[in-house]
Amino acid sequence: MSDADANDLRRSPLHARHEALGATFAPFGGWEMPVQYAGGEGDKGGVVAEHTATREAAGLFDVSHLGKVRISGPGAAAFVDGCLTNDLRRIVPGKAQYTLCCADDGGVVDDLILYLVGDDEVFAVPNAANSAGVGKRLAQVAPDGITVADEHDAHVVLAVQGPASGRVLAEAGILPETGDDDLDYMAFVDVTWDDTPIRLCRTGYTGEHGYELIAPAEGAEVLWDALLALVTEVGGRAAGLGARDTLRTEAGLPLHGQDLGPEITPLQARCGFAVGWRKDAFWGRDALVAEREAGPRRRSWGLKATGRGVPRGHMPVTVDGATVGETTSGTFSPTLKTGIALALLDTAAGLTEGDLVSVDVRGRPLECEVVSPPFVESHVR
């Protein structure tokens, strides 16, 4: 990456904190974000250590690269519901919902989380690279009285994930009352901590019990420092995007741009649960209904290596020498101690759980078992 390219990348308001922790940075979605952190004395740190800490205790992630878009005005919720795939009428104010922004042909422009504040306000969290595009699409068709505001720079987003995450937030005085059960999965609450307004939601991207916090960018260092101290106290640590990727892959969660995208529909990516099939209208509805009736030509599956080797994205998958699909994501699983991948496999091949396929890993065949994701048991609920 050239100096000119580096200068074009956006940085989190917490960038200096990451530097102080010895972070290794990389470009991601137009941002320069921490991939992993250096360890202390006698501790190498790195992705595996951060991954394991999150699975066993707690990990603190800065995911401020995620978008922040506020849609407000009379009928804002009904307007959003008519654009995005999921049925916003299924939830009530104080709940969040996973949904998709699709193109007319059914391809996925982005996947995002919606926070339903009320009939007149929805707060959306798209992916970093697509935030402006999703906001622009909504703004272009918004009726008079509906405002679509990009608030990307106004907030940070922090994620506290892992079995001790509730304890961390309770001890910080952020989680209401004292227990993990005070927030249901996908529920959110607005709280005040140290005179700072925080939107706290029981969501995450690791497959572990966890929370995400949306807070003002100004003064975010104080919140980060307080959370990191408590996370460290319970045996956890700061975690970068490297661990976030291995965790989400083990959990079978799709990443836009790899497992979801303009050429990959919700049905192909096993995200049909996020489509309100009974709704009269949403972007891409006609194409998706037609694909549902005909059956998708390919579908996402998990692949678990039976031997030594690590599959990565965009590697051919074959059976008896015939190509039957392609990997979309792949990594080494620190939990399972083997290579894993998500792959789009042709439905015509008739593959199912337990079947064996071969992945071409840079010219070397790697035998893998077809499995249904997640690879590691989820503890999100």
Image (spheres, helix red, strand yellow):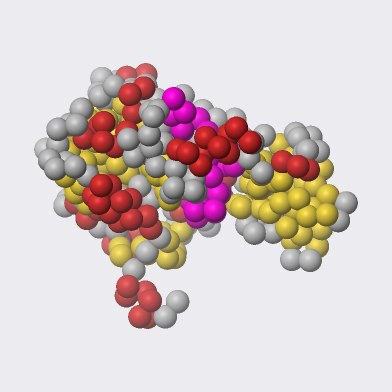
Whether residue 58 is visible here, answered yes or no, is no
Compared to residue 355, the image places residue 131 above or below, namely below
Q: Residue at x 65, y 47 (%)?
A: 344
Compared to residue 133, the image places residue 345 above or below, namely above
Q: Residue at x 34, y 28 (%)?
A: 88
Q: Residue at x 53, y 45 (%)?
A: 265
In the rendered structure, the answer to whether residue 68 lies left or right of residue 277 reads left
Compared to residue 90, the image places residue 21 above or below, namely below
- Give yes or no for residue 293 being in the magenta stretch: no
Give percent across and percent down for residue 133: 33, 55
Q: Residue furthest right?
A: 320
In the rendered structure, the answer to whether residue 178 lies left or right of residue 310 reads left
Whether residue 343 is visible here, answered yes or no, is yes
- Of the pair 176 and 63, the residue shown nearer to us: 63
Q: Residue at x 25, y 24 (%)?
A: 93
- Of the pair 273 and 160, the residue shown nearer to us: 273
In the rendered structure, the answer to whether residue 262 lies left or right of residue 97 reads right
Q: Which residues are magenta?
A: 250-278
Most common secondary structure along the magenta stretch: loop
Q: Quadrant of residue 211?
A: top left
Compared to residue 187, the image places residue 351 above or below, namely below
Give percent across and percent down for residue 8: 32, 73
Give percent across and percent down for residue 181: 37, 19
